Image (cartoon, grey):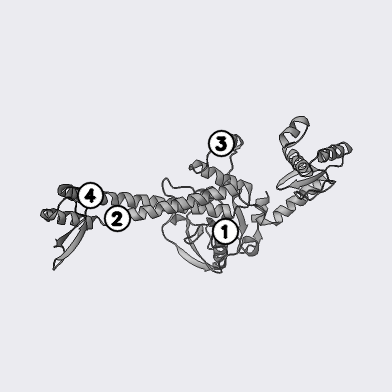
């Protein structure tokens, strides 16, 4: 008996309870677990429990390794579970399918970059190809069909030296010369194209690295939903009908993390690209300070100055938190770039969270989170809300 048939024949019956009962029936080889459940339902002895990450109602008389935390009172049980989740920051992990998808995309982009670099190397040799074509043209009297190579005098060096040029034995002498000129012309024309493709691929790689970093350290379902939405928007994840029906708008402002430094300055940062973009585009002002891990994926952190000059200690605290929420989190010392908001620009058509920094300074700090450094940390409080 499977979960679907249990749901069809017994009402009301949730999918989670049906799956649990179906697994118990399969293991026991009989319908006794279903009979126990019916008896517990009638007697009112079913208790709240957790199956994986899903809350359900279970029969405490049935021993099942998948059921966790039986409790006689639903309210007390939920409060206990929520307290456990809030105390354990690492309890939430991203969907493995998303992590795998981004990992495969990173490998694909790395391979594409290597191919373009090989093409670029060939294109950068266009002058060499042009000289070979001219030398073949000058020594056409040496060429014969069926030759695999020819030795010519390279008069581009002083004194001239012999140069061996490979040939296609199936081509006529005239075809060999035209082929050499075409190769030089294509390489010359393709140089700009390859450089542009390499730049675009590097930007895509940086964006995928940012997505991988965000999934690695995601700590809420809302942040994961924002990342999922962005992957769909850029064609890495197929938008299914059911997903579109469940899709809800998530305001990036609701996902901003905050704390206050000992000097009384507010710090704000994001944990996904859209929240980072919201901070850098709408919250960051010209006199504010902006922080980001140097040459590594990480959060955008804004120190609101309100026209005041923050003490050096508060600047270092901001840098330490920016380092903590980056790929440099586990480094003993991390280099963090910082600058005034007026030097942070949004490139036209760039992906969310991608910025150009005109000028900046760097700080070497030990990565630490806001709970250690901030006088009145509100990051955990905001996450709870």
Judged left or right of residue 109, residue 238 is right
Disc with the residue nearer the chain's start (4 vs 2)? 2
Disc with the residue nearer the chain's start (4 vs 1)? 4
* Distance Cα–Cα, label 3 vs label 2: 42 Å
Disc 1 target residue? 325
Disc with the residue nearer the chain's start (3 vs 4)? 4
Disc with the residue nearer the chain's start (1 vs 2)? 2
Quarter of the image for residue 13 reads: top right
Residue 240, numbered label: 3
Disc 2 target residue? 122
| Farthest front residue in view | 146
Disc with the residue nearer the chain's start (3 vs 1)? 3
Judged left or right of residue 378, residue 23 is right
Q: Position of residue 235 (x, y in %)?
A: 48, 42
Q: Is residue 296 visible?
A: yes
> Alpha-carbon neighbours of circle 4 within 10 Å: few (<14), some, or many (≥20)?
some
Q: Position of residue 248 (x, y in %)?
A: 60, 38
Disc with the residue nearer the chain's start (3 vs 2)? 2
* Distance Cα–Cα, label 3 vs label 4: 46 Å
Cβ–Cβ under 8 Å for marks 4 and 2: no
């Amino acid at each position: 008996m499977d979960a679907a048939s249990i749901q069809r024949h017994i009402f009301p019956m949730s999918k989670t309870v049906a799956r649990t009962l179906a697994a118990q029936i399969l293991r026991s080889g009989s319908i006794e677990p279903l009979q126990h459940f019916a008896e517990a339902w009638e007697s009112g002895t079913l208790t709240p429990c957790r199956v994986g990450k899903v809350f359900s109602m279970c029969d405490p008389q049935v021993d099942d390794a998948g059921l966790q935390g039986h409790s006689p009172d639903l309210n007390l049980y939920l409060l206990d579970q929520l307290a456990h989740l809030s105390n354990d920051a690492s309890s939430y992990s991203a969907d493995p399918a998303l992590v795998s998808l981004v990992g495969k995309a990173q490998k694909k982009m790395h391979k594409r970059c290597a191919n373009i670099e090989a093409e670029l190397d060939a294109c950068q040799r266009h002058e060499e190809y042009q000289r070979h074509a001219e030398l073949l043209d000058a020594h056409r009297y040496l060429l014969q069909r069926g030759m695999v190579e020819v030795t010519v005098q390279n008069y581009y060096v002083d004194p001239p030296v012999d140069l061996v040029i490979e040939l296609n034995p199936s081509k006529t002498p005239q075809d060999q010369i035209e082929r050499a000129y075409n190769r030089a012309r294509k390489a010359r024309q393709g140089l700009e194209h390859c450089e542009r493709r390499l730049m675009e691929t590097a930007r895509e790689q940086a964006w995928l690295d940012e997505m991988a970093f965000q999934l690695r350290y995601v700590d809420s379902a809302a942040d994961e939903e924002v990342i999922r939405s962005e992957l769909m928007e850029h064609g890495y994840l197929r938008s299914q009908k059911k997903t579109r029906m469940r899709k809800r708008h998530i305001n990036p402002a609701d996902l901003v993390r905050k704390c206050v430094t000992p000097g009384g300055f507010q710090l704000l940062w994001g944990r996904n690209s859209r929240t980072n973009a919201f901070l850098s585009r709408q919250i960051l002002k010209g006199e504010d300070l902006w922080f980001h891990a140097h040459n590594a994926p990480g959060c955008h952190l804004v120190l609101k100055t309100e026209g005041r000059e923050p003490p050096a200690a508060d600047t270092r605290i901001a840098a330490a938190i920016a380092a903590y929420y980056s790929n440099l989190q586990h480094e003993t010392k991390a280099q963090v770039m910082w600058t005034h908001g007026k030097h942070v620009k949004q490139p036209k058509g760039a992906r969310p969270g991608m910025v150009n920094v005109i000028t900046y300074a760097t700080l070497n700090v030990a990565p630490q989170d806001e709970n250690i450094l901030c006088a009145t940390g509100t990051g955990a409080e905001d996450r709870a809300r």
